[in-house]
Amino acid sequence: MLFRKKKLFNFRPQLLIFYIIGLIVSFSAALPAYVNSTFISQFAQLKFVSLFFIIANATSLLSILIFPKIIKRFGKYKTFIVLIFLYSLALFFFSAANSFLTALLGIVFFTAFLNLTLIKLDLFIEAFTKNTDTGRIRAIYLTICNLGWVVAPMTSAYLINNFSYSFVYWLSGLIIIPTLIMFLIFSSELKVKIKYVQDGMIKVAKKMWFDKNLRGIFFVALILQLFYTTAVVYVPVYLNQTLGMGWDDLGRIFSFMLIPFILFQIPAGFLADKYFGEKEMLYIGLFIVALALIGIFYLNQPVVWLWAALLFFSRIGAALVEAMRESYFFKIVNAKDLGMINLFRLTTPAAYILGPALAILITSFLPIQYIFIFSALITVSGMFLIWPIKDSK
């Protein structure tokens, strides 16, 4: 059989299938990611666009909280198959949105099913990972997934200019179908016995809070997701609607800015495993992100090359933080810790609730660009949260 050969390049060959699935899911998610806010703004004012993301991610957060019970009831393999199917349907529904209500339902379904699908991929990857290889395996996985994010913005821009916003969502739903087929074909080779720890979420939260390492990396993850909220929701709106930059330029800028995720995460994961640990690169990454956000606040001219350079710089920092976040967290938990992994991934919907809520407050009194300076201050606070954690080296 295909997967009964010896290990290849220090990781189990089953991971190759999950890497491919991760790439397709990431490309599908990335296609609409940078156009969601502008698409929704056709049906709602900016303050209500923020509300859309709050509602969608509150729903996602609740879904993640009950996810362990769903997996226990239906099994990890059947659950993944159903999630992929529902995620695809959500995108098809979103593509047909033509009103405030249908756009709201579209973003709710899309966000919830995407987050649950990504958690399941986390669990599968962790099940086939040795602790000594965590940094490298996670970095390779992130890099492959980020390939989809690099290609997607230019693709989205082309589709918007030549077809419509709706076509972006339709294509996103269509390209996810091969992952379902691939998983069904290889499912017998991907099975691994895992007895999940059946702790309640309150117990898991207490464990996280009283463990300085888990608590520190949890809040670093939350801060990184708050940056992504700012970058994905408000930077495109600011550039397109405030500075008047077209999607041809934005597509090229957003694709270029994501290249650091391809260049830096695998070397960072290797260095974390072999030499430095994670703390040093977390400090450097957060400092770069904060500095870039200050630059975004002050740059108010639609100069393509300046924005491309500044956003590229911001993603160097984000790439380092993301790689170290994954490496550190998955070195101190394993695949059976379903509750802890769920709690860790709650940082994504939590950030997409806190970020837009803060944005509503800020934009009620100040111009939109002040979101970026507040985000920079929050990012700086992450550097103090890293101090207590014990490095892995």
Image: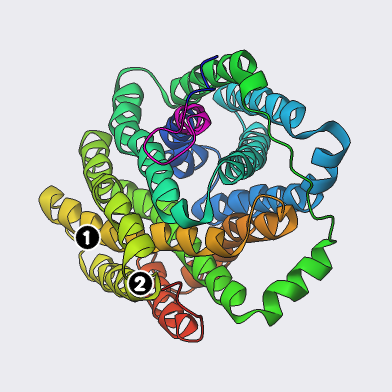
Q: Nearer the viewer, residue 360 or 311?
A: 311
CA distance separating discs 2 and 1: 12 Å
* Residue 211, image x, y percentages: 65, 79
Pointer 1: residues within 10 angstroms few (<14), some, or many (20+)?
some
Q: Nearer the viewer, residue 339 or 27?
A: 339
Amino acid on which the number 1 mark rests in the picture: Phe
The count of marks equals 2
Q: Quadrant of residue 163?
A: top left
- Residue 61's tag is none
Circle 1 residue: 313
Pointer 2: residues within 10 angstroms few (<14), some, or many (20+)?
many
Which residue is rendered at x = 50% and y = 34% of the image?
15
Q: Quadrant of residue 275?
A: bottom left
Circle 2 residue: 286
For marks 2 and 1, the one nearer the N-term is 2
Which residue is rendered at x = 38% and y = 70% of the image?
277
Report the magenta residues as a range.
Answer: 6-22
Q: Is residue 233 visible?
A: yes
* Residue 213, image x, y percentages: 57, 76
Which residue is rendered at x = 32% and y = 56% of the image?
270
Element carrying mark 2: helix
* Residue 75, image x, y percentages: 80, 33
Element carrying mark 1: helix
* Residue 24, image x, y percentages: 46, 27
Q: Is residue 229 visible?
A: no
Amino acid on which the number 2 mark rests in the picture: Leu
Q: Quadrant of residue 197?
A: bottom right
In the rendered view, does 252 fall on the left or right side of 191?
left
- The answer to whether residue 293 is magenta is no
- The answer to whether residue 9 is magenta is yes
In the rendered view, does 11 fall on the left or right side of 186?
left
